[in-house]
Image (cartoon, rainbow, N blue to C red):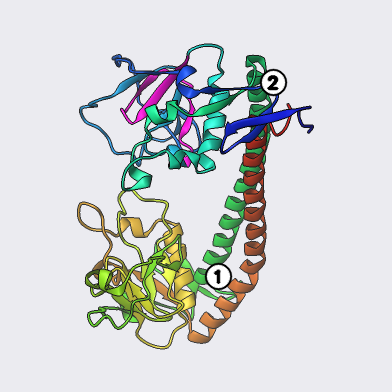
Amino acid sequence: MEKYPTYKQSGIKWISEIPEHWETLRAKNMFTKEKRSIREEDDVITCFRDGQVTLRKNRRTTGFTESITEVGYQGIRKGDLVIHQMDAFAGAIGVSDSDGKGTSVYHCCTPKGKYDATYFAYLIRIMAYSGYIQSLYRGIRERSSDFNFNIFGRQYLAVPPYFEQQSIVTFLENETANIDAYIKQRQQEIIALNELKQAEIAQVVTKGLNPNAPMKDSGIAWIGEIPEHWECKRIGSTYIENKHINSDLGCNEAYKFNYGSLVRKDEDVKLEEVADVYSKYTVISKNDIIINGLNLNYDFVTQRVAIVEQKGIITSAYVAITPRDEVNSEYFSYLFKSMDAKKLFNGMGTGIRLTLGFGELKKQQIPIPPKDEQDLIVKNIKAKTSKIEEYIAALKSEIAQMQEYKQRLISDVVTGKMKV
């Protein structure tokens, strides 16, 4: 794509040069901040961090804090430029595709003249990604302090001629739609590969490696038949609850869950600042298995099982279990992950919030192959899934590159570095 013939200094820090025929105008001279009353028929609109502004029911209805009285709600109209007061730094800036209502944390703006709201949504989102939006925040805690519209209104923006704004929007909508479709296709491939991997694991941890082995009924509804020489026992016969509390602060390497694995907490704090918390954590050792039994009643996404790779500590809110005898914990980790994939843990919790504790977990029946067969199953799983995981990693890298390309393309076009 070619550049414009001539450029000039814009006087805008985060842009530098713009095409010679473009203008620069203050935001307040181009947009009016609206404050409308709500109507009875208005549904709730949400401004998402990916720039979509739409009726909440069009996208998702869970994971939001609901307002009972809707104090301060305002009317939003299709075509409004909407800027999220607290999430603008993360890209929550876009044009509403519907009429509705939203909370007072939204700045709803309408153009005063021939200014394409979608073009300026693209431009302001690039301001956000450059860090410039966040630099306009005021308050002690940058991420949670308000995006001040009056301060924003004093900022200069790059302004192409109106027909060129429209051309840029048409070009970007077409190009980004193609990129998004490509990314979605790759994401679907990842989902399919993960399902294939999970199916491979579930097959061998419940049926073994020999397809011709004599079988018997396990008495476990979700498994059915298992090899005749395997045992069925309660989890509590193989694992005990780890109740080793870090009361003496002998360990300070804290871990947290990250979708089926444990990762070190990135905490730049002194030990004395977290001593009261860390002293209540559970000390975990290699081959322990951690199960996140929290929020079972509404969280169906979290991968709840992780095996411990090295000694550390983790919140005692999770279930930590230690093998009673010599077993291959990797086999049981794969087995529990298969149970998790079938959402079996979600039906085991107790209490209002359906929390799973060891008292309930230990009652569950599981298949137990001989130790040498556990070892062979683990070796087989690693061999079969390693290539799948390599391909998934390659797809994730490709997605990241395409997302980076998309962002760079938008930035170059809306700031005039490339001519449409």
Q: Is residue 93 magenta?
A: yes
Q: CA distance from mark 2 to mark 1?
A: 67 Å
Looking at the rendered structure, the secondary structure element under dot 1 is helix
Q: Which residue is mark 1?
A: 204
Per the rendering, the mark at residue 21 is 2
Where is residue 64 drawn, in percent x and y? Answer: 33, 39
83 sits to left or right of 362: right
Where is residue 227 drawn, in percent x and y? Answer: 51, 75
Above or below for 288 versus 17? below
> How many residues crowd around disc 1 within 10 Å: few (fewer than 14), some, or many (20 or more)?
many
Q: Is residue 279 magenta?
A: no
Q: Amino acid at mark 1?
A: Val
Looking at this view, is 298 or 83 the one in front?
A: 83
- Front of the two marks 2 and 1: 2
Looking at this view, is 390 or 381 the one in front?
A: 390
**Quadrant occupied by the C terminus:** top right
Whether residue 319 is visible: yes
Residue 238 picture quarter: bottom left
325 sits to left or right of 420: left
**Quadrant occupied by the N terminus:** top right
Where is residue 60 drawn, in percent x and y? Answer: 41, 35
Q: Which residues are magenta?
A: 90-111
